[in-house]
Image: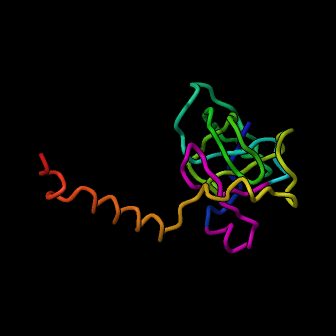
Amino acid sequence: MIDYGACGGKESAKELNLPIVKGLVGGKTVDVLRDTGRGASWVVDDNQLTGKCCLIVRIDNTVLLAEKARIQVKTPYLSGEVEALCITEAICDLVVGNFPSARNPDDPDMTTMIGALTTRAQARQEVRLNSQRFHKKDLDHR
């Protein structure tokens, strides 16, 4: 199960200098934190909802109701289809908890992400190439 959340939002992760890496959720680039204090992980994107919910009790005894989803992840810590808990505010896009198949925090497999992410420069170049392909003069060839 994936759970998400902690305190303070995404800016807190930067301020605390947490070890954030890039990963993919359903093909979308996300920030990933490996958290050994969790038995689950949470994800912001709520697509692929299962219609089920789960109560989460936080360290301060506050209770949160989270919807469950099945998502595809590709991260240096965990890859494959996982069950996730979705909430609206979290310290990171995806927090990978203590899954049996999750890699240890000090042993991420960074090779899983080689070639998987598109840089901003690559995205701009791709847009330019795509727009060049579809100029009116190219479409009028009959």
Height in image: 26 above or below 13? above
Q: Which of 130 and 92 is in front in this view?
A: 130
Q: Is residue 134 left or right of residue 47?
A: left
Judge whether residue 135 is colored magenta.
no
Q: Quadrant of residue 50?
A: top right
Find residue 56 and report its horizontal and vertical position in percent: 72, 39
Q: Position of residue 79 (x, y in %)?
A: 72, 43
- Which coloring applies here? rainbow
Residue at 71%, 55% (x, y): give it: 6
Task: Look at the image and tell me in which quarter the C terminus lies.
Answer: top left
Query: Can residue 91 be spotted in the picture?
Result: no
Please state if 14 lies on the left or on the right of 57 as rendered: left
Quarter where residue 100 is shown: top right
Compared with residue 51, is residue 114 higher up or lower down, i.e. above or below? below
Label total for image = 0
Residue occupying the point 75% across, 68% down:
18
Indicate left or right for 33 with 9 as reference: right
Tell me the residue at 78%/55% (across/down): 34
